[in-house]
Amino acid sequence: MMNEKNFTLAEKWAQEGNMFRHMSQDKQPTVLSDIYQAETNIAIWRREKSDTLEYSVKEFLSLNPTFKKEMILTPQDAFARVSESFANKMTELSEDIAELVDMFCYLFELKEVGMRLKVLDKAMCPKFHVDKVPCRLVTTYQGMATEWLPHDLVDQTKLGWDCNGLPDCESGLYQSESDIQQLDCGDVALIKGTRWEGNENAGLVHRSPELITNEKRLVLTLDFM
């Protein structure tokens, strides 16, 4: 017999027309294909950055402390155009971005992708929210990575304007700070949004982390065009 809490959650999922949503993660990049499973709203490739990539990222940040770039890329031109925007330096970082562009396009059968690469010194999206996109790739090359909430622990009625101006920790959006999950620096995540067919009320709830003074993040996102 269901207890009252479980019954309430079951009613909530039934009303939203959603199945239970969960995370899928692995140390192999093939885990990203799990995003096609209806029950998965975040797929995480738990990778470790190579020493050469780590060095490339640190060098990049030292030379480009306020870098921001948005580009439309194809798998064929990604490396050349990204490398050119870096003045033909930071080969390892350019190669990594080009590889992720190729993977993203292959996985979703896309001819081109919207890329954003930004150095951030404050939270870009500090409040929990869902993305109005089919799916977004996000990876943090330097600094603290994205925070997110498991779907079954979120009160969707407290998102956005429905929080009545209260901070996330007071709005009732989640019950405990321990509910908050966080990606690791270097992880590659596919975050399912509300425009994925059948996922209208189950986009992953996530936010940018708060940064300590003088800390910088280097964040890459890839989007459908």
Image (cartoon, grey):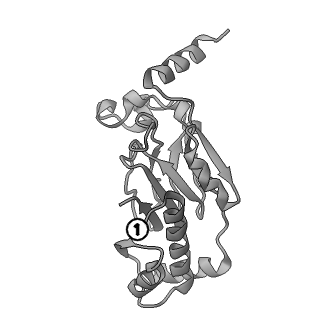
Is 127 situated left or right of 29 in this image? left
Q: Which of 207 and 14 is in front in this view?
A: 14
Whether residue 225 is visible to the viewer of this picture, yes or no, is yes
Q: Position of residue 223 (x, y in %)?
A: 41, 59
Query: In percent of the image, x 49 and y 20: which residue is there?
Result: 14
| Relative to 183, residue 221 above or below | below
Is 89 situated left or right of 6 in this image? left
Question: Which amino acid type is shown beneath numbered disc 1?
Answer: Glu
The residue tagged 1 is: 112
Is 114 situated left or right of 92 in this image? left
| Relative to 110, residue 178 above or below | above
Q: Where is residue 216 in the image (x, y as percent from the top left)?
A: 46, 68
Query: In percent of the image, x 56 and y 47: which residue is there?
Result: 36
Whether residue 142 is visible to the viewer of this picture, yes or no, is no
Q: Quadrant of residue 187?
A: bottom right
Q: Nearer the viewer, residue 41 or 87?
A: 41
Q: Quadrant of the N terminus?
A: top right
Classed neighbour count for the residue bearing mark 1: other residues with Cα under 10 Å, few (<14), some (14–19), many (≥20): many
